[in-house]
Amino acid sequence: MRIGRKSKSEKWPDMLPEPIRINRDAFIFRPGEINVARRRWPIFLIFLFLPLAAMATADPVPANDSIGTPFGLLVVLLIFAAYLILVGVGIILALAGLAFSAILVAFGVVSTSTFVALVRRRVSAGLRAFHYQLFALTAAPCGVMVLGLGTWLFHLHLRQRYILLFGSFAGVGAGIALAFLLDRIVHLIYHRFISRNEFVSTPGSNA
């Protein structure tokens, strides 16, 4: 008789799993079963292609003729009219905002020129300030258009905000330079031809 510690199988014999038995005959097809499986394939293919054949021979779905009815035409006309009204309102508001901005800019230019004339106490200074601002404002959009055209012709990759920013600065600078050049030309013409004629004495003035 063996005396000592019992193994786990001796202590709890019911808790051990039963051995798994594999039936080898389940994986072996007999010749009769293979013939039955081969006969089932055509039946499966027939049931597979029956829905496709039914869909191919079915009548086409008639088109929805609800738009051709008077109610459908009325709905389409109402939607189109609402779209036109919204577009018209947007255009009117945009034009009003553009006109208001132009009025503000013009008021700013005139008021600045008037302030310069009052400070310098000369009308010519106000006119000079007016034409400087006018040339700068006129040349700013021209600079944007020229820069945009240059980027399109030479295939330069610049963002729209950079085109607007750099084009505006370039246009303002070119406008101020052009105004300065025109100012110098007018100043030269005035001092060469007009101011001399003012000091020329008329005949009989010395008498």
Image (cartoon, rainbow, N blue to C red):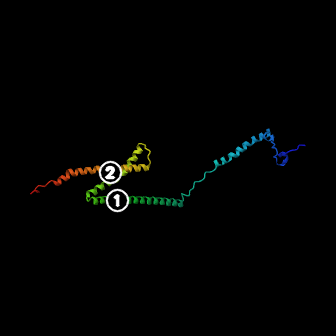
Q: Name the residue under label 1.
A: 108
Q: Position of residue 53 (x, y in %)?
A: 66, 47
In the rendered structure, which amino acid carries the disc numbered 1?
Gly
Q: Distance between the residues labelled 1 and 2?
A: 17 Å
- The extreme front residue here reads 4
- The extreme right residue here reads 1
Q: How crowded is mark 2: few (under 14 residues within 10 Å), some or many (20 or more)?
A: many
Mark linked to residue 176 = 2
- The extreme left residue here reads 207
Question: From the image, which quarter does the N terminus lie in?
Answer: top right
- Picture residue at 39% right of the left edge, 46% below the top: 149
Out of 16 and 207, give the one closest to the viewer.
16
Q: Is mark 1 on a helix, strand or loop?
A: helix
Left or right side of 162 for 130: left
- Picture residue at 32% right of the left edge, 60% below the top: 111
Out of 133 and 25, give the one closest to the viewer.
133
Q: Position of residue 27 (x, y in %)?
A: 78, 40
Left or right side of 190 for 153: right
Is any atom of residue 171 visible in this view? Answer: yes
- Picture residue at 40% right of the left edge, 50% below the top: 165
Q: How crowded is mark 1: few (under 14 residues within 10 Å), some or many (20 or more)?
A: few
> Between disc 1 and disc 2, whose residue precedes?
1
Q: Where is residue 39 in the image (x, y as percent from the top left)?
A: 75, 41
Question: From the image, which quarter does the C terminus lie in?
Answer: bottom left
Q: Position of residue 72 (x, y in %)?
A: 53, 59
In the rendered structure, which amino acid carries the disc numbered 2?
Ile
Q: Using the rendered view, name the quadrant where residue 3 is placed.
A: top right
Q: Using the rendered view, name the quadrant where residue 102 is placed.
A: bottom left
- Picture residue at 25% right of the left edge, 49% below the top: 185
